[in-house]
């Protein structure tokens, strides 16, 4: 693209120089000098254009390097944040698991305690019923003996 611009620019300058060269012979000396000047200007313009192209390439490479570095840094930061978030999730999950285990243990203890109390009540009621049955049996035996 840069070569096309340079070639077009050079063609336009040379075309202008040739047009200036067409005319009287008296002006021919001026045209030759002008053509030399145009050639120098054209060469200078080509050099300037080449320098500008080199500068643009250098700036582009530098910008790409900066962008790559910024992208890498952003990736590193994202990886660190992701790792921290993962650690927080693991910690929260462990904490929730510990809480569930504790609540389950407490519920189990309550069930055991309730079962023991119910067993004690059943045993007491069974003993009381046994005593009542024994007493009723004794009374019936006494009544039978009296008769």
Image (tube, rainbow, N blue to C red):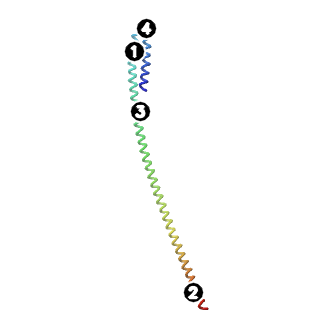
User: In this figure, which residue is indicated by the disc labeled 3?
Assistant: 60
Cα–Cα gap, marks 2 and 4: 162 Å
Q: Which element type, helix, strand or loop, lies under badge 4?
A: loop
Helix, strand, or loop for circle 2? helix
Q: Which mark is residue 138?
A: 2
Q: Residues within 10 Å of mark 3 (few under 14, many from 20)?
A: few
Q: CA distance from mark 1 to mark 2?
A: 149 Å
Point 40% across, 34% down: residue: 61
Q: Earlier in the sequence, mark 1 or mark 3?
A: 1
The image quarter in which residue 144 lies:
bottom right
Q: Earlier in the sequence, mark 1 or mark 4?
A: 4
Q: Looking at the image, is 12 positioned above or below residue 27? A: below
Separation of marks 1 and 3 at Cα, in angstroms: 36 Å
Residues at marks 3 and 4, CA–CA distance in whole angstroms: 50 Å
Residue 113 screen position, x and y as percent: 51, 70
Measured along the vertical axis of the image, is residue 50 above or below residue 18?
below
Judge from the rendering whether residue 145 lies leftward or rightward of residue 37; answer left or right.
right
- Which tag, 3 or 4, sits closer to the chain's start? 4
Helix, strand, or loop for circle 3?
Answer: helix
Quarter holding the C terminus is: bottom right
**Res. 90 mark:** none
Q: Which residue is mark 1?
A: 35
Mark 1 or 2, nearer chain start: 1
The image quarter in which residue 13 lies = top left
Task: Label 1, secondary structure: give it.
Answer: helix
Q: Is residue 63 left or right of residue 128?
A: left
Mark nearer the N terminus (3 vs 2): 3
Query: x and y percent of residue 124 in the render?
Result: 54, 77
Mark 4 is surrounded, within 10 Å at the Cα level, by few (under 14), some (14 to 19) or many (20 or more) other residues, namely few
């Amino acid at each position: 693209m840069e070569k096309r611009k340079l070639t077009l620019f050079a063609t336009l300058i040379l075309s202008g120089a040739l047009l200036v060269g067409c005319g009287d012979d008296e002006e021919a000396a001026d045209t030759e000098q002008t053509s030399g000047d145009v050639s120098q200007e054209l060469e200078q313009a080509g050099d300037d254009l080449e320098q500008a192209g080199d500068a643009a390439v250098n700036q582009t490479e530098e910008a790409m390097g900066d962008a790559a570095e910024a992208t890498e840094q952003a990736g590193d930061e994202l990886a660190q944040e992701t790792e921290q978030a993962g650690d927080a999730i693991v910690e929260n999950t462990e904490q929730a698991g510990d809480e569930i285990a504790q609540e389950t243990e407490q519920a189990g203890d309550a069930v055991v305690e309730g079962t023991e109390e119910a067993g004690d009540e059943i045993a007491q009621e069974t003993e009381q019923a046994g005593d009542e049955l024994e007493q009723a049996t004794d009374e019936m035996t006494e009544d039978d003996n009296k008769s």
